[in-house]
Amino acid sequence: MTELLRIDGLKKYFPILNVWKRRTGWLKALDDVSLSVTKGEILGVVGESGCGKSTLGKTVMGIHEATDGVITFEGNDITHLKPYQSRELRRDLQYTYQDPGASLDPRWKIGKSLDEPLIIHTKLTRAQRRERVSEILNAVGLPEGHLDLYPHEISGGQQRRVGLARILTLHPSMVVLDEPTSGLDVSVQATILNLFLDLQKQFDLTYIFISHDLSVVRMICDRVAVMYLGKVVEIGPTEEVFDTPRHPYTQSLLAAIPQIGKARVTETFWLEGEPPDPGNLPSGCRFRTRCPKVAGRCATEMPELAEKRAGHADACLLVE
Amino acid sequence: MAELLNVSGLEVGFQTDNGLARVLDHVNLVIGKGEIIGLVGESGCGKTTLARSILGVLPANSARISSGSIRFDGRSLLEENAADLANEIRGREITFVPQDPFSSFNPVFTIGDQVDELMKWKSPEAPLGSGRRWYSPRRRRNDRARVMELLRTVQLPDPEGILKKYPHEVSGGQRQRLMIAMALLPEPKLIIADEPTTALDVTIQAQILKLLKRLATERDVSVLFTTHDLGTAYEICDRITVMYAGQEVESAPTEAFFAAPRHPYTNRLLNSLPSRDRGITGIPGQIPGLIAPPAGCRFHPRCDLASAHCKASRPEITEAGARHIVRCFHPVLAKEPS
Amino acid sequence: MAGLRFLLRKLVADRTAALGAFIIMLLIVVAIAAPVLSTHPGDVTEFHPPERLLPPSLEHFFGTDRMGADVYSRLLFGARITIAIAVIAITVSVLIGVPVGLIAGYYRNWISDGLMRVSDIFLAVPQIVLAIAIAQTLGPSIENVILALSATYWPFWARLVYAETRSTLNETYIEASIALGASPWRVMLFHVLPNISSSVIVRTTIGMGGTILTAAALGFLGLGPPAPSPEWGRTIAESREFLPEAWWYATAPGMAIFFVVMGFNLLGDGLRDILDPRTRRSSDG
């Protein structure tokens, strides 16, 4: 059980600008987030839009620069790397985009897109590259013939396979999957999820699996972190978080998922209201404006993420 | 249950660069008064085209309706004068809730302006007929009162304030509440909701589904609810119709549908939902192209149960139980509900 | 090359663009074959005062000018000058403007700001005035017209490429490439440039028409190549005093300028529609 990635007190604030480009406040997309990822595991990061889960992935990747905090990958501090250093890091730490169709250059054939990472990072000859590409293509289950197609000529599921193939050519040790199943039909989604699991075994990968789809996360993640408005509110083993959720937000999130054959959400769901404006957060606990269990001290005290059971932490003042 | 909408034998083709795509192939659909029908299928199955055919908003330059009929409340939507239908049916008797509420608002006008414009033409008090029209202050007052009442009903906080805002100033969930309110304002008989919760977060989705179901039941409005998600269909529908590659393959009341699905595609679709007990099983193969779809049953290339018969001839609709129909030669045996 | 065939097929399907392409092709053929096509090739430099201002006839298709030279033949040789000026001036503008725009668009620092401010300064001075000033200072000649046009036209490409680069950089596939570890020059040359090339091509095509017009204007004002050059703008200037009697004298070069500029504009508009990458099929690539 070696620790591959460690995030300590990570903050990412985006300035809120008015029409005169003067800063009027901060949008706290990530506010004091700490977690670690063990080699070989799949960590799910769930939450609704605006909770900061994508920002987390992009800040780890260095696409956004952290405002504060430390990111450690394979024992090295990677928080503030120079451009050439972060380019080197890309071999080991990779990122897949929510919309793989958009992440492929529309004017490039698939074959050229798959070749690019090898050209950037290796000194392989054309023939060696060709060999590596067809090996990966085989692993993600795409026919050779696809190398000569343009991205818009293949289906969404196939684009996702190409996106995966593109990052796997470099044999990374860790992959951040950002909403990897959104926009896929369920029958395709199932095959793609199986592909993730197969590739994980085959290439010895560690995943951070960012998703809003809790049933998918439950299927394939070992541990799950629940985020709300820039904070991790609960983190623990998937089974435990789903079976005995402790934070009221996790509870309502789980209660909102339609489950066929079970009681209907339209009859049982209790949560009212919408998340507050992320540029203008409530004092104390950020969930208190919607929380059904809210108490007086929730408005004054900021709950910290605390491990109240082995491996299972939550950030709620009311949970013992 | 009295019948409100009856689509029968509808065939719609789209002219593309590569030939005629037969997007709807002899589709039948019945919606009763006050019924919520789920139209479920994967992308490209034709559910949106069916919804658009009923609304009468198919792209005129590429789409062609070659046969079939759509009867709504005693009127034939494919045969009557288009201008009359636009005036008397569309936006009045049949309204629409879109998938993306943002692009359905005009960004340069306030929400209030857009609601006023809708009420001017389509409020229940608005006279029929088109052309220039005087919007009397009395009617405007009545309409305003109606709008306020409905905005409160859809649980929008601060209804007066929201009318002064621009579309980008309200959240996605609130925009969808507004859309539902605007769909209900003309007091329609049928609402067509095209994936109304797909763009929303799961807690907001639950709220919107709850709201839509409550209002439809209270006001006795029928809803045609298209979705790719069987879970949301389970939540609010009375009856579910599954479409595959331009045909309806199974239709049944919700309870029977989930308890005993008969079509192999429906079964595979249900099995591909992520579930801890079962593992993940997808459906091998791909959705067929609609320009040259497979002969016989359109699902046969991906079906385990396919026989030579399935490859050669086209299955017709057969009865498989009470109000339960299936388009298959070898329907899966009904199992006892567990 | 298959891509080119695809382009041609699309071009033929679009009638107005095909007309534009035809006009431009005609211009090029005429310019190259001027010595063969002209009836009096010597008339560019030779004069026949007794035959001055003759109306159009079989001997002189477009009549003769004030020196008795054949207007038709001079028109053909004028096409050479026009093409040379336009092509060289535009090439220089593109070679300066595109890299400036790419670099200014890619980076977000003082270099970027500096480059764009310089191009803003050039854009702020009315183009024809700047061109006149340059041509006036350096004296009338083809080279100076080209210099004046290049100096005034490059900021248009810099502006265009800058804006296109900025918007292309927001595309996910660019971010994906950077996340993959691609270096800035790689992103600029292999991703951004090909993706903005169609707007550059369209702008260049339409810009050709504008350049020809400005070149003719400079010629008209006497800042172009000196007499006896058959440059079109100069020819129109010379013909002024003989209007309206010798109508053919001004009409011929006037119509030539009109058709050529229209040809480039039609072709540019057509290319704008044709070059949309999302309509391209792999069978053509």
Image: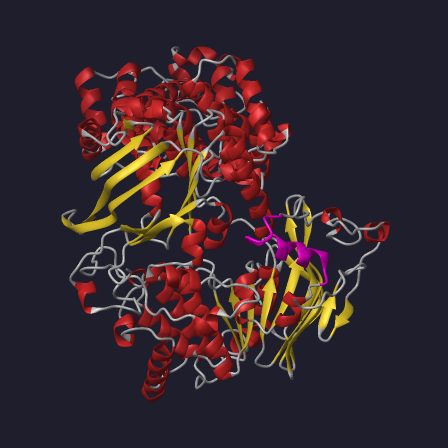
* B124 lies above or below A94: below
Query: In x, y percent, where is residue C238?
Result: 31, 25
Of the pair B152 and A250, the residue shown nearer to us: A250
Q: Quadrant of the N terminus of chain A?
A: top left
- Name the outermost residue toward the front: A310
- Foreground residue, A226 or B215? A226
Where residue A193 appears, x then y in whole percent? 54, 43
Residue C139 location, x and y as percent? 21, 16
- Residue at position x 40%, y 60% in the image: A253
The answer to whether C15 is drawn above or below residue B253 in the figure is: above
| Quadrant of the drawing holding the C terminus of chain A | bottom left
A151 lies above or below C69: below
Which residue is drawn at the image coordinates 25% and 23% (left, top)?
C151
Q: How is the image coloured?
A: secondary structure
Task: Quadrant for residue A85, please give it.
Answer: top left
User: Magenta segment, which residues?
Assistant: B262-281
Q: Is residue B260 left or right of residue A15?
A: right
Task: Report how many numbered discs are placed on residues in the image.
Answer: 0
Q: Is residue C194 visible?
A: yes
- Residue B51 sits above or below residue C90 on the image: below
Q: Is residue C181 left or right of residue A14?
A: right
In reply to whether residue A296 is colored magenta, the answer given is: no
Main SS of residues in magenta? loop
Residue C253 visible, this orientation: no
Relative side of A90 to C20, left or right: left
The structure residue drawn at horizontal position 25% and vertical position 73%, both measured from the top left corner, is: B161
- Depth order, front residue of B117/B24: B24
Decide whether residue B276 is among the magenta residues. yes
